[in-house]
Image (cartoon, helix red, strand yellow):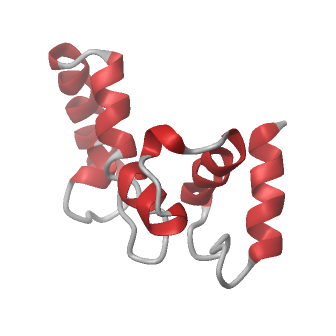
């Protein structure tokens, strides 16, 4: 969450230390469910969809709570590589990742 919420940094030891300290501080302020919710709401899902709720509306035209297990699994797999797993451009790859998530 700290890494995706912060401005881009050089990938070096000092950046890793800063992220670790930020993550530790966040863990002292928020519980795990708050951290997970914030993380899911900031992840890129491809096709200009940022956050799980936006992705559910964008890909399925449904609120998050109305998704089927298969639809939720598709969304769960997208942040792994949203460009390569784009369901519009690579439906086979998106389906294969969905099956991995379901297994």
- Residue 78 pos. (x, y %): 59, 59
Residue drawn at (25%, 19%) of the image:
27
Quarter of image, res 17: top left
Residue drawn at (28%, 41%) of the image:
19
Quarter of image, res 33: top left
Q: Quadrant of the C terminus?
A: top right
Residue drawn at (78%, 39%) of the image:
102
- Residue 51 pos. (x, y %): 36, 54
Is 87 located above or below residue 69 in the figure? Answer: below
Q: As drawn, is 51 to the left or to the right of 74?
A: left
Q: Quadrant of the N terminus?
A: top left
Is 49 located above or below residue 51 in the figure? Answer: below
Residue drawn at (76%, 56%) of the image:
97
- Residue 57 pos. (x, y %): 42, 60
Question: Nearest the camera: 55 or 20?
Answer: 55
Q: As drawn, is 65 to the left or to the right of 30?
A: right
């Amino acid at each position: 969450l700290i890494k995706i919420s912060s401005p881009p940094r050089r990938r070096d030891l000092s950046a890793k230390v800063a992220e670790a300290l930020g993550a530790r501080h966040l863990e002292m302020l928020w519980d795990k469910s708050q951290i997970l919710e914030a993380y899911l709401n900031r992840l890129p899902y491809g096709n200009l969809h940022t956050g799980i709720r936006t992705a559910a509306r964008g890909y399925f035209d449904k609120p998050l709570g109305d998704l089927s297990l298969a639809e939720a699994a598709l969304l769960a797999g997208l942040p792994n590589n949203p460009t390569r797993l784009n369901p519009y451009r690579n439906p086979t790859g998106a389906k294969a990742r969905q099956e991995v998530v379901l297994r």
